[in-house]
Image (spheres, rainbow, N blue to C red):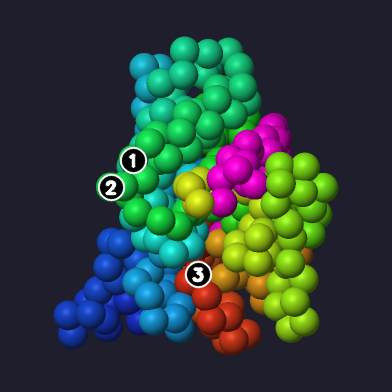
């Protein structure tokens, strides 16, 4: 155990003695039954905005017959905390219910993303306006990782100390042509980020019914095999990535073996770097 981990453990014990314990909604951890060396931890911090927390995390290992799945996700809402909560409750179930999931997981994920978005749009009256980004990572039998995303929440893997981004940041500026082909436009006002129709700072998202003609929920999907060089995976909302590069994030936690402590350290580092957005982080260690 490193010195930092010892200090974190001491801090948690002191908090427990005085009745201050981390909320389950804010922090948690778990481990694989198939491989005791694979663990996960997550931590969330609300940003400095006046609206309720709009980030949601999903992180668990699940037994399915004789197989094991690691299911990890970040859902970052905009103008809504209802839609990311809906995604947390439904997206993975929709993916796993696809009949071809085990034989063609990439295609199953693409279909489930689109089915889930259609369900959200059909329930727009109940779920309200706004939308959510998503990044999901499914670890199949501790061997194969399938990552998908819409929006700017991001997945990064570290092998031999080198960070590699597995997701795609869906920014309006980079998808201007497809947005304009659907009849929309991308604004570029001084002092502001590029926005779809002058409103949304991501080019792909769940929900956003009022903008849907000019958006898509089509995910980018990537597959990565887990080998002996694999050290960790980070999933995080843009509250982290606005203030840290992929390599900086990996370097910041390479010495922290406890996955939850690593996730917590990254949130603290993002706050120290003046990130004002909601910050949610999942770390998977190998």
Residue 229 or residue 92, whichever sits in front: 92
Please indicate whether residue 195 sits to the left or right of residue 121 in the image: right
- Magenta highlight on residue 219: yes
Q: Residue at x 57, y 70 (%)?
A: 239
Q: Is residue 68 visible?
A: no
Q: Identify the residue position indicated by label 1 in the image.
A: 123
Residue 167 — which label? Answer: none
- Magenta residues span 211-236
| Callout 3 secondary element | strand
Q: Residue at x 31, y 47 (%)?
A: 125
Residue 110 or residue 12, whichever sits in front: 110
Q: Where residue 62 appears, x then y in whole percent?
A: 38, 33
Q: Is residue 209 visible?
A: yes
Q: Residue furthest front?
A: 183
- Circles 2 and 1, Cβ within 8 Å, touching? The answer is yes
Q: CA distance from mark 2 to mark 1?
A: 5 Å
Q: Is residue 34 above or below residue 210?
A: above
Q: Identify the residue position indicated by label 3 in the image.
A: 279
- Mark 1 and mark 3 lie on one chain; the one further toward the N terminus is 1
Q: Looking at the rendering, which quadrant does residue 248 occupy?
A: bottom right
| Callout 2 secondary element | helix
Please indicate whether residue 206 sits to the left or right of residue 215 in the image: left
- Mark 2 and mark 3 lie on one chain; the one further toward the N terminus is 2
- Circles 1 and 3, Cβ within 8 Å, touching? The answer is no
Q: Residue at x 40, y 44 (%)?
A: 87
Q: CA distance from mark 1 to mark 3?
A: 27 Å
Comparing marks 2 and 3, which lies closer to the viewer?
2
Q: Residue at x 77, y 49 (%)?
A: 180
Q: Identify the residue position indicated by label 2 in the image.
A: 126
């Amino acid at each position: 155990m490193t010195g930092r981990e010892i200090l974190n453990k001491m801090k948690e014990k002191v908090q427990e003695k005085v009745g201050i314990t981390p909320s389950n909604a804010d922090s948690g951890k778990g481990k694989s039954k198939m491989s005791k060396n694979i663990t996960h931890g997550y931590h969330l911090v609300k940003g400095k905005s006046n609206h309720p927390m709009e980030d949601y995390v999903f992180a668990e290992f699940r037994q399915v017959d004789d197989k094991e799945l690691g299911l990890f996700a970040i859902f970052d809402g905009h103008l809504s905390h209802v839609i990311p909560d809906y995604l947390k409750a439904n997206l993975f179930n929709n993916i796993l219910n696809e009949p071809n999931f085990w034989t063609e997981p990439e295609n199953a994920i693409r279909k489930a993303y689109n089915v889930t978005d259609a369900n959200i749009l059909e329930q727009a009256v109940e779920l309200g306006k706004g939308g959510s980004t998503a990044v999901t990572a499914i670890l199949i039998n501790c061997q194969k990782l399938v990552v998908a995303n819409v929006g700017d929440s991001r997945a990064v893997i570290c092998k031999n100390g080198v960070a590699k981004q597995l997701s795609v940041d869906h920014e309006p500026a980079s998808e201007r042509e497809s947005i304009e082909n659907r009849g929309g436009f991308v604004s570029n006002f001084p002092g502001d980020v590029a926005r779809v129709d002058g409103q949304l700072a991501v080019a792909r998202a769940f929900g956003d019914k009022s903008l849907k003609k000019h958006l898509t929920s089509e995910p980018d999907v990537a597959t990565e095999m887990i080998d002996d060089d694999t050290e960790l995976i980070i999933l995080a909302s843009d509250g982290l990535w606005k203030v840290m590069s992929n390599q900086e994030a990996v370097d910041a936690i390479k010495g922290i073996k406890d996955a939850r402590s690593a996730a917590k350290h990254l949130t603290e580092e993002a706050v120290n770097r003046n990130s004002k957005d909601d910050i949610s982080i999942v770390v998977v260690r190998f």
